[in-house]
Amino acid sequence: MGILAWTWILVGITFALYIGIAIWARAGSSKEFYVAGGGVPPILNGMATAADWMSAASFISLAGIVSFTGYDGSVYLMGWTGGYVLLALLLAPYLRKFGKFTVPDFIGDRYYSNTARIVAVIAALIVSFTYVAGQMRGVGIVFSRYLEVDIDTGVYIGMVIVLFYAVLGGMKGITYTQVAQYCVLIFAFMVPAIFISFQMTGNPIPQLGFGGSGEDGVYLLDKLDGLSQELGFHEYTSGSKSMIDVFAITTALMVGTAGLPHVIVRFFTVPRVKDARVSAGWALLFIAILYTTVPAVAVFARIKLIETVSNAEYSELPEWFGNWEKTGLISFEDKNADGVVQYVADKATNELTIDRDIMVLANPEIAQLPNWVIALVGAGGLAAALSTAAGLLLVIASSISHDLIKKIVNPKISEKGELMAARFSAAVAVVVAGYFGIHPPGFVAAVVALAFGLAAASFFPAILLGIFDKRMNKEGAISGMIIGLSLMFFYMAKYKLHWIGDPTVDTAENWWFGISPEGFGTVAMIVNFVVSIVVSRFTPEPPQEVQDIVEHIRIPSGAGEASSH
């Protein structure tokens, strides 16, 4: 059977499974819509969290970044994994004990202010829309290759599917769907990695294979260093980024992870505070399976790509090249008209343009694996993108229906009315997300990295100080969030989106402190902390009852039960 037939079969089976689960577990109340009724077992919540967190950026883009940037790409591995540990230890149990559905709900109540709540809603919407753009783009890329449609059509198909099970099932449907999606995506990522590791090194364990040697007896990493330098690229195993930028990006990704609303809300779906910690441990284990495999997949894919296309006759290139050329994600321009593909670092003579996002998806085809494996990777990419997109859409829906409409605009709204508002908000969010998926600011992982920067700049200081500083008041939190978010947004607009200033100027030379837009969330976060603390010390203390709540959520005694309010 061909790749297209296998794709229809595997995508059809997995989608039927997701939609079936969404119908079986559809939400009947607002509590089920927002937090799945708070009754999800920790191991299943760990799986759902892993699927929620391992988005299209992790599945599709991460190995692509590492394969092109080598050592420099390790900041994403360190930042995202470290951030998860930070979230599990510093934030999740305390937020769970506070007992609120959403991050804006926590900020609104902790800082006894609707203004704080509105600022948090705006921040949640900006972060979620920036992030979901990357997921929709990922869906479009997968559909464009495997269903042989253009990327825009792929995004439209993804919009319809996400809308169906996010709007119908809410958090309850999404949670159980994400458990299934985790199983699909991890299987889809590991099967080709095991195949290729065995093919290239004789070792079926990718984590060990990529540190081993090939049939020629040369270590894979030494071989890749040699190939990279021959073509004029940077040595794979050494970095080109400044140490301050590496530190800034890693920190921004870490604290951004810890402040991501769609990940935090997962800890409200378990019965007890203790379960929040346990499910965080399970999630870390499930995430580590993929993240420890990424460097191996990156090395395998890069070597295979260079050996297949560099200095090859264009007319003799294998079938996979033509398949991906149709999507526009890889292209050949014969500058010297000799019919030979010249793939080099020098832009003036390089004839091959490759989108980093294809590396994981094209890898099984390049390695000439069976068609069912190639189709399986497509199904896994869709599972990764759709699971995160659904989680993000839920955050957007709950921010509007619960935090804006119920808490501020119309406190007397009925349960049914709130549920309707949440579903309508999700529907509008899908349309906006689809637009950003068709017109994204950069490739998938870069867009997602900016979302982490925005979360770091806005949420992390407000949440951390809200838990650990009794003296932190609404004036400090509001001013810190506004300044942090504004600073990050200004920097993005100037150096990433080029909305401000002259876009023809080489912006990297003008970066503040030598820090890239992906890492600037760290600077904005520090400014947020400083502003929040200084302002809070020159303004009135929070009310005594708020200080008592802060004291209460940090006490381990009775930590087995969540607070009821």
Image (tube, rainbow, N blue to C red):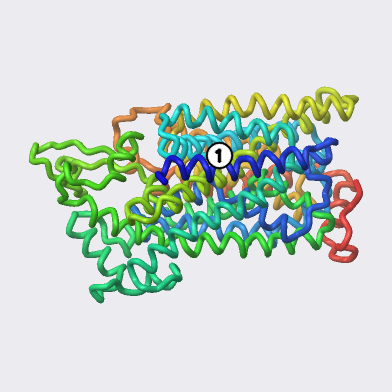
How packed is label 1: few (under 14 Cα within 10 Å), some, or many (20 or more)? many
Q: Nearest the camera: 539 or 527?
A: 527
The residue lying at 85 percent from left, 23 percent from top is 410
434 vs 353, left or right, is right
Q: Quadrant of residue 394?
A: top right
Q: Nearest the camera: 168 or 477?
A: 168
| Residue 98, x across and y down, in percent | 83, 50
Instruction: Look at label 1 and name its amino acid.
Output: Tyr
334 vs 28, left or right, is left
**At numbered mark 1, what does the secondary structure look like: helix, strand or loop?**
helix
The residue lying at 83 percent from left, 30 percent from top is 407
307 vs 245, left or right, is left
Q: Nearest the camera: 394 or 237?
A: 394
Q: Quadrant of residue 504?
A: top left
| Residue 344, x across and y down, in percent | 19, 49
Instruction: Read off the residue under disc 1.
Output: 131
161 vs 499, left or right, is right
The residue lying at 29 percent from left, 57 percent from top is 304
| Residue 270, x across and y down, in percent | 79, 54
Q: Is residue 388 visible?
A: no
Residue 272 to residue 540: above or below: below
